[in-house]
Amino acid sequence: MDLISTLTGFGSGVLFYVPPFLLLLTIIVFVHELGHFLVARWCNVTVRVFSIGFGPEIFGFYDRKGTRWRFSWIPLGGYVKFLGDESVASTPDHEGMRELSEEERKGAFHLKPLGQRAAVVAAGPIANFLLAIAIFTCMFTFVGQHHTLPIVDKVQPDSAASEAGFEKGDRIISIDGEPIETFSEMRRIVSISGGQRLDMIVDRNGSKITLTPTPRTEETSGPFGKVRRGLLGIHGSDSPEDYFVTKHDPLTSAWLGTKETYFVIARTMVFLYKFAQGQESADQLGGPARIAAVAGQAASLGVIQFVNITAVLSISIGLINLFPIPMLDGGHLLFYSIEAVRGRPLSERSQEIGFRIGLALVLMLMIFVTWNDVIHFTSL
């Protein structure tokens, strides 16, 4: 009975987050597929279908160039289907392309030059990155960045900070030579530096001294899942005098938005590298249910938090799609790279085997992260 009650609670909690999750996913998927679509049109590729969701169509319409724009019943993704595609994963329909007329062949995606095909495929993830940059740019321009000064208000006993000699009132000037202006900048560097010694210069009563803490890697559990991060054991100032908001001009905001996007990508790649080395736990990988929880909780905190999480997840989805797995955009780019080196495409048989392996990998990954979600929510 306890297990049944737990699973029931898990299901009802997820259902509560479904509307914001679907809204977030629809925005991200639409932008991703729009990237593919716009570059395909620019390359004169015939686009047959632009779909938000999978499965049977709910409603749709044709545009003036004959593309079917549709919304489908399973709102967990989307696709753009080109002339010459056999499936929604853009696997080539070799038999069908042999039957195309000479005029139709001009618009077949798989018969376009290698550079154009690569551009169309890469446009989806790039669109996700550009969406994130645009969101961050608007946030930094109109909302501003909320920060506190990098001043230590409290040092936890028996922490990395106490061992390194931090004291209340210390103001952090730099970390490993990088200037620090806000407490969040310091925390961000520390969070990805677990187990690594940091050279930190602090201002203590007007004198600059050097401290060399080694942040401890600790695992914390929360509504968004388990996270392993570096911790010093210090708290920032709560004084209103140390709190400030900075709004930037659009050009500066765009640069900061690009840096923020790069940081999310770099942080993800560092996690994957450590995961491959066995330094990160697989239970940190979440699936649709955990993403729904993140979206729902962000929405409950307000529009700004929801928009911010949309940017972060857009980056994540763009990055995942670049993984060199057949069925994903990165898999297509891998095939194109091999084609560029060989001077000719892989054989039809090799491509078919590759796509089958890719499909198996994607399905196994989905099963794994979904099981992780169940374990995560039933353990709360």
Image (spheres, rainbow, N blue to C red):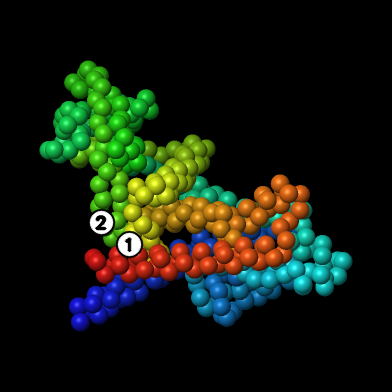
Does residue 241 lie above or below 128 as drawn? Answer: above
Q: Residue at x 39, y 71 (%)?
A: 18
Mark 1 is surrounded, within 10 Å at the Cα level, by few (under 14), some (14 to 19) or many (20 or more) other residues, namely: some
Q: Which residue is mark 2?
A: 221
Which amino acid is tagged 1? Gln
Which amino acid is tagged 2? Ser
The reply to whether dot 1 and dot 2 touch (C-beta < 8 Å) is no
Does residue 30 lie above or below 187 as drawn? Answer: below
Front label number (1 vs 2): 2
The N terminus sits in image quarter:
bottom left
Q: Which mark is residue 297?
A: 1
Q: Residue at x 62, y 76 (%)?
A: 60
Residue 378 visible somewhere in the drawing:
yes
- Taking the image as shown, residue 112 lies to the left or right of residue 174, namely right
Q: Give how far across and how far down residue 113 sits, in percent.
A: 77, 53
Q: Give how far across and how far down residue 331 sits, in percent.
A: 60, 57
Residue placed furthest toward the top: 207
Q: How many marks?
A: 2
